[in-house]
Image: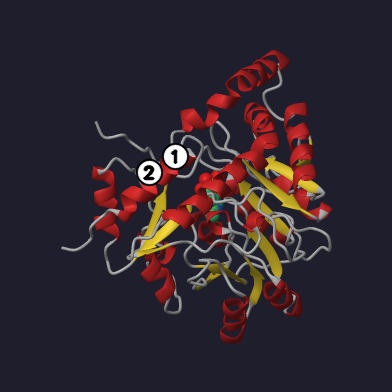
Amino acid sequence: MTKRYPFLDLASVNEPYMDEMCMAAQRVIRSGRYIGGDEVNDFQSELGRYLNVPHVVGVSNGLDALRLILRALIELGRLTPGDKVVVPANTYIASVLAITDAGLTPVLVDPDPATLNITAQAISTAINTHSGIKAVMPVHLYGRVAWDEDIRKVVSDNNLLVIEDSAQAIGARSHTDGLYVGHNHAGALGHAAAFSFYPTKNTGALGDAGAVTTHDKALADTVRALANYGADRRYHNIYQGYNCRLDPIQAAMLRVKLPHNDDENRARMQSARLYDRLITHPDVIKPLLPEFEDECIWHQYVIRVRNGKRDMMRQQLKLAGVDTDIHYEVPPHLQPCYAGLSHVPLPVTEMTASQLLSLPIARGTDLEDVAAIAEIINNVNLTE
Ligand SMILES: Cc1ncc(COP(=O)(O)O)c(C=O)c1O
């Protein structure tokens, strides 16, 4: 019988943490505190220490984290509705949804085809083409940090706000300092960052969860108030806010998993290195290994399949027992909801969208499986 290689089995991902998670769940249930409280506060402190960032606000999910940051920047007078935000066009749609939801205008740019991340060159070109650009949202796509000396220079020279979309990159580090000297974790590089703890993320909750991280106390206080009906204290609403809080039960699950994030990431790095060494199929473009290993935490291991053969490869892999996924098949600007969105031509985004194929890499896919999957890929015949 053919062995099956699932793309992602979340029950296997969480199995090693079962006993601790059950104990943490009991702790929350027995506490009688189901909104806010110590569990959320302790998680915020622990995440802040892990990322070396002074302010963390636990929130409901990654999209809300981005929305809250942008709304807070507007409330603080640092952005005005209509301002433009540069964002890579090949991101998950949540990055763009947050920008338009805040009444800001996304300026979509093509990524570097080698890293699939935004570049300083693309940001400069956008600045030279558009007036009113006030911010940039680097997305650390697939867990690869989108930050280097050139990006730091272009954002500093142009006084741009930097909102990192760190949803996929918990634990990744840049080898260039962020805007704040000595801080180099994804999520501590710019003015503020959004994290997602959606269950499939490297550190995933048992439902929706997210966090905002920032160096800026005023921004953190504003986000915290906005996420709690706009209240800065009980029944005192200074903003027309939302309910976007992190649940203590999810904070408790995340407190179990966060201490293991580096180990989980290292296992993915090993798998990525092995895929890189073993895949030799002529139609496959492998993702670039980063110069420094911790610059990428391999939330996804995404190959590209040339010559219009991605779907055929996917089909053949499925027949051979290997489940794959596509991140993302249709970029935001080609989604029906953004039919009217103006943008420059985005040839890299559109070309790569038709080539991308994500291979299994999470816990549950061990090194033997990686070797077997690489061999299956190498044996796929894509001639018609
Ligand atoms: C790049 C990126 N940004 C934002 C989000 C939104 O996070 P969430 O699913 O927690 O709302 C995601 C997640 O799925 C993501 O991959």
Q: Nearer the viewer, residue 116 or 188?
A: 116
* Disc 1 target residue: 368
Structural crowding at the residue carrying mark 2, measured as other residues with C-alpha within 10 Å and reported as few (<14), some (14–19) or many (≥20): some
Image point 64% across, 56% down: which residue? Answer: 293
Image point 66% across, 69% down: which residue? Answer: 135
Q: Which of 225 and 261 is in front in this view?
A: 261
Structural crowding at the residue carrying mark 1, measured as other residues with C-alpha within 10 Å and reported as few (<14), some (14–19) or many (≥20): few
Image coordinates of residue 154 in percent, x first then y, are 70, 78
Image point 69% across, 31% down: which residue? Answer: 255
Q: What element carries label 1?
A: helix
User: The N terminus is located in which quarter?
Assistant: top left
In this image, 242 relative to 327: left or right?
right
* Disc 2 target residue: 372
Q: Which of 89 and 351 is in front in this view?
A: 351
Is there any visible trace of residue 245 in the rendered image?
Answer: no
Q: What element carries label 2?
A: helix
